[in-house]
Amino acid sequence: MRGFKSFGEKTSLIFGDTFNCVLGPNGSGKSNIMDAMCFVLGKGSAKGLRAEKSANLIYNGGKTKKPAKEGEVSLYFDNTKGIFPVDSEEMKITRIVRQNGQSIYKINDKRHTRQQILELMSKANIDP
């Protein structure tokens, strides 16, 4: 994540193969992590991500820091078993939101449509 909601700086989270748990005090960004995952997987509604409009998904800088120009979230999937129909052992899904609310979707750094992302995820039974 970079510039998404409360995550102004680049933030990486590594999830394990089985059970994962996100813990922290109130206001530490736990829900924003889940919102980021739904966002990159193609959830369409800003309201479903607890934001009034898409531009509100971009880090606003708070009281003392500089706001981000755009918000970006990427998820990396292990594709060694060929669950996704792509020619690589790792698949990267990225979504970028711009100040005007426009979203850009990418699969392995190549631009795609939201519908293509949703179709790819459905092949692995993933629903945002």
Image (cartoon, helix red, strand yellow):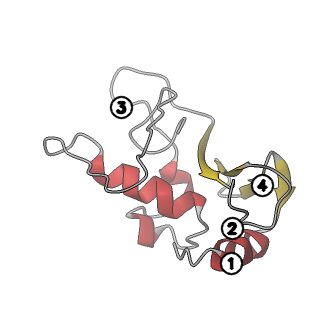
Q: CA distance from mark 2 to mark 3?
A: 40 Å
Q: Residues within 10 Å of mark 2 (few under 14, many from 20)?
A: some
**Farthest front residue?**
81
Residue under circle 3? 62
Q: CA distance from mark 2 to mark 1?
A: 7 Å
Whichever of labels 3 and 1 marks the residue nearer the N terminus, that label is 3
Tell me the residue at 62%/51% (across/down).
78
Q: Amino acid at mark 4?
A: Ile
State the image coordinates of residue 33 (x, y, percent, origin top left): 39, 50
Q: Is residue 63 left or right of residue 120?
A: left
Residue under circle 4? 107
Rendered image: mark on residue 83: 2
Assign a secondary structure to mark 2.
Answer: loop
Residue 18 position (above or below residue 124): above
Whichever of labels 4 and 3 marks the residue nearer the N terminus, that label is 3
Of circles 2 and 1, the one toward us is: 2
Q: Amino acid at mark 3?
A: Gly
Circles 3 and 1, Cβ within 8 Å, touching? The answer is no
